[in-house]
Image (spheres, grey):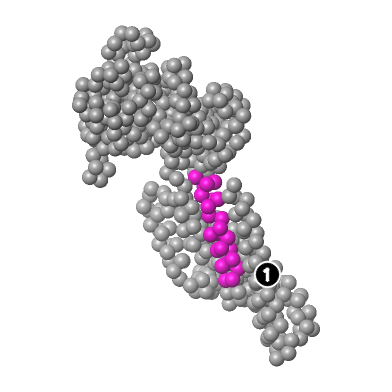
């Protein structure tokens, strides 16, 4: 096996394309996972069983089935019912939905960690429920959930290559395409491996800064 | 036993005379937590403007009375009325209207750590009473002045001492201009040297306002100073009630005597 720098430089344009797609999927997937997870958590706290029950079943189902299966379902089965989205859109949504069932547990723990005295003080001041959530409970809960949510972002990053299976050309997809065309595997796969480490590392640095800022 | 907080001696200020209307009434209140009966068929009536102190051993149900009035917990049986409005059952709107008239100060302060001191005080007046930001801030600054923390308006509560936090909590409760102020062991979590400042502030408030006060405390000198009526609790019942001069110097019940000799 011989390392070939010219293969690296030939791969680089494809690498940048793949990197862009990976980062897009990660950013949009995170946004979906964070918002949808919060929505699930709040719905699970409604007094109506007819809301809690379906949400509970749906999220348990999604959490306990493989992401790859969900991806195939959304990409190959939904079109048969007339719902067609681009591969990237489908992939972003699948990752976001899958991880939302984890982030909802993080939010729940964050909300439960807000001391009962905060709820009581809000009641004693006759703050309406919505206002209590918006200005008392969630701001305190969100501060606690940043570290675990950040860890899920890094997990999500490591799951993005799975999008290759539905034809999304993220980093691994680009590397595989290049390898198949040039019969050179070592260089492209090494490049994206390094890229994953660098992105994870930068993300964890960012996360630590954010944590330090929030814990005042 | 049934307790009326009407005047029993004549040398009290006329402002809290027997003609004040009844503001709070509890009838046949029972509250259990599991096998533990915290309140056992309790009756209590408080007239507007009275300062009532609840004393007695821990677990005797004093705090539960305050929590019931603040609608933080519900009774198993019995009825509670505040200013003519029945609680439990009541609609959410009716409950909110009652809560608006009642302020509560907690043992652990329960300030909102994510807000500045000023915002802690202005939040409810703006969102609940509909005051403008300027009005609410003016009111808050006046109250901060009263509690001696005018310079801490922009501080975070966590940067303050326990005594300062509790004074902010008192200001926060007063900003709603409540008819009733519930004080739940407000000095129990404080370092000893900070207790006097908070109690002096409450003495001032008791003297200069006509707010009805229900106060759970272990500070017997304070209770003697501010109360019109002292209620001695034991095992979920009021076993003795009367003006502080009598309860503290000449209690009728053996149990009260024991309790007082243990804490005084």
Total number of numbered discs in the rendering: 1
Helix, strand or loop status at disc 1: helix
Q: Which sits in the foreground, B101 or B240?
A: B240
Asked if residue B174 is positioned above or below residue A8 in the image, the reply reads above
The residue under label 1 is A198
Q: Where is residue B236 in the image (x, y as percent from the top left)?
A: 24, 34
Q: Which residue is at a point 42% across and 44% down the rendered structure image?
A: A116
Mark 1 neighbour density, 10 Å: few (under 14) some (14–19) many (20 or more)? few
At 49% from the left and 40% from the top, the residue drawn is A132
Q: Quadrant of residue B12?
A: top left
Is there any visible trace of residue A101 in the rendered image?
Answer: yes
Residue A1: image location, x then y, percent = 70, 91
In this image, B31 relative to B160: left or right? left
Does B111 sit left or right of B3 as displayed? right
In front of the other: B73 or B169? B169
Q: Which sits in the foreground, B67 or B95?
A: B67
Name above or below for residue A101 compared with residue B10. below
Tell whether B189 sits left or right of B79: right
Q: Give the range drawn in magenta.
A: A137-159
Q: What is the magenta segment's predominant secondary structure?
A: helix
**Residue A187, above or below B90:** below
The magenta stretch spans residue B105? no
In the rendered image, the vertical position of residue B84 relative to residue A157, given as above or below: above
Question: Can residue A155 be found in the magenta stretch?
Answer: yes
Where is residue A115 shown, x and y percent of the image? Answer: 45, 45
Where does the image place residue B53, in percent across and percent down from the top left? Answer: 34, 25
- Looking at this view, is A25 or B112 the one in front? B112
Q: Residue at x 36, y 30 (%)?
A: B218
Give the chain of mark 1.
Answer: A
Residue plotted at (52% across, 32% down): B164
Q: Can residue B3 be seen in this view?
A: no
């Amino acid at each position: 096996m011989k390392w070939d720098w010219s293969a690296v430089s030939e791969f680089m344009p494809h690498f940048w394309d793949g990197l862009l797609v990976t980062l897009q999927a990660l950013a949009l997937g995170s946004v979906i996972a964070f918002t949808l997870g919060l929505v699930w958590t709040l719905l699970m706290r409604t007094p109506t069983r007819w809301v809690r029950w379906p949400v509970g079943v749906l999220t348990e189902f999604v959490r306990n089935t493989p992401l790859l299966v969900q991806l195939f379902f959304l990409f190959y089965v939904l079109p048969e019912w007339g719902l067609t989205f681009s591969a990237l859109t489908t992939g972003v949504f699948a990752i976001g939905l899958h991880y939302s069932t984890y982030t909802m547990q993080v939010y729940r723990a964050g909300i439960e960690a807000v001391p009962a005295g905060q709820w009581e003080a809000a009641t004693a001041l006759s703050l309406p429920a919505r206002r209590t959530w918006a200005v008392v409970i969630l701001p305190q809960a969100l501060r606690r959930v940043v570290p675990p949510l950040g860890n899920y972002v890094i997990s999500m990053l490591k799951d993005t290559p799975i999008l290759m299976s539905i034809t999304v050309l993220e980093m691994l997809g680009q590397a595989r395409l290049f390898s198949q065309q040039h019969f050179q595997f070592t260089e492209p796969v090494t490049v994206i491996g390094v890229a994953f480490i660098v992105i994870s590392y930068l993300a964890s640095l960012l996360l630590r800064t954010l944590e330090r800022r929030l814990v005042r | 036993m049934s307790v009326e907080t009407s005047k029993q001696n004549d040398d009290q200020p006329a402002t809290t005379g027997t003609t004040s209307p009844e503001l709070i009434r509890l009838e046949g209140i029972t509250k259990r937590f599991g096998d533990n009966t915290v309140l056992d068929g309790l009756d209590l009536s408080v007239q507007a403007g009275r300062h009532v102190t609840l004393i007695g051993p821990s677990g005797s149900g004093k705090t539960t009375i305050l929590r019931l009035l603040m609608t933080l917990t519900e009774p198993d049986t019995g009825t509670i009325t505040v200013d003519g409005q029945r609680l439990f059952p009541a609609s959410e709107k009716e409950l909110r209207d009652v809560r608006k008239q009642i302020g509560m100060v907690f043992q652990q302060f329960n300030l909102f750590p994510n807000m500045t001191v000023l915002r802690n005080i202005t939040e409810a007046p703006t969102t609940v009473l509909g005051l403008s930001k300027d009005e609410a801030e003016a009111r808050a600054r006046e109250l901060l002045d009263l509690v001696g923390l005018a310079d801490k308006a922009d501080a975070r509560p966590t940067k303050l001492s326990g005594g300062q936090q509790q004074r902010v909590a008192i200001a926060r409760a007063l900003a709603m201009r409540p008819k009733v102020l519930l004080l739940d062991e407000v000095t129990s979590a404080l370092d000893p040297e900070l207790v006097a400042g908070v109690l002096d502030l409450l003495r001032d408030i008791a003297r200069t306002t006509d707010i009805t006060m229900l106060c759970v405390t272990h500070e017997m000198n304070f209770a003697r100073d501010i109360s019109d009526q002292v209620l001695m609790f034991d095992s979920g019942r009021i076993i003795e009630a009367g003006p502080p001069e009598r309860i503290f110097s000449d209690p009728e019940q053996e149990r009260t005597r024991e309790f007082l000799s243990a804490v005084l």
